Amino acid sequence: MSNKIPTRPPKLLPTATPRFAIVASEYNPEFVQGLINHTCKELYKIDPNSVVDLFGAPGAFEVPLVVEMAAAQHKCDVIIALGLILQGQTKHAEFIAVSVSHALQQVALKHGLPVIHEVLLVSGEEEARERCLGLELNRGVEAARAAFAMLKVKEKFKSQSSLR
């Protein structure tokens, strides 16, 4: 896991209004709300005209289904999936994390839509605080920056296809 978050990308073209859907688990709300807050704050820092729709899912396992429903509406440019899975003494958390990762990738590929995966599997509350509430390694900030980076990639593909 990287100890550095990517630098803030530049704002998109002035004519573009970026539209984001955030799908967030409602389980472990203190930590997930921190991710939501940091993600939104960073999205608006990069582009104050950003439009953000927030959707809740009961837990991390349900996040991919809500992501699929958001993707099927075709109303956003990027979906950001947020959640927190705390590792316990069994393998259950790992099974959930692998399932969520695979399902999110399948939604992205099916719809040709960037899905930023920040459903975190952490070893304990200290790591959760660091990744969700802290400022140095905050994965919400990272998610927002990755979302804009993917918008830039989409822009490049659109401009190349319009030249043909």
Image (spheres, grey):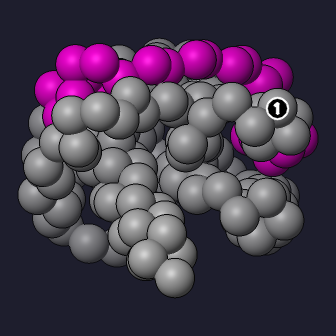
**Residue on which disc 1 sits:** 73
Query: In the displayed structure, would residue 149 be above or below residue 127?
Result: below
Horizontal side of 94 relative to 128 (left or right) equals right
Of residues 137 and 44, which is closer to you in this image? 44
Of residues 23 and 137, which is closer to you in this image? 23
Q: Percent position (x, y) of residue 59?
A: 77, 31
Residue 98 figure quarter: bottom right
Residue sitting at x 23%, y 43%: 13
Q: Can residue 24 be seen in this view?
A: yes
Q: Percent position (x, y) of residue 47?
A: 22, 29
Q: Percent position (x, y) of residue 120?
A: 53, 51
Query: In the displayed structure, would residue 30 be above or below residue 146?
Result: above
Question: Helix, strand or loop at disc 1?
Answer: helix
Residue 38 figure quarter: top left
The question of residue 139 being in magenta is answered with no
Of residues 142 and 158, which is closer to you in this image? 158
Q: What stretch is highlighted in magenta?
A: 40-68
Residue sitting at x 41%, y 33%: 18
Q: Is residue 41 visible?
A: no
Question: Quick one: label 1, few (<14), some, or many (20+) residues within 10 Å?
Answer: few
Residue type highlighted by circle 1: Gln
Q: Determine the residue located farthest toward the front in the rendered image.
A: 164
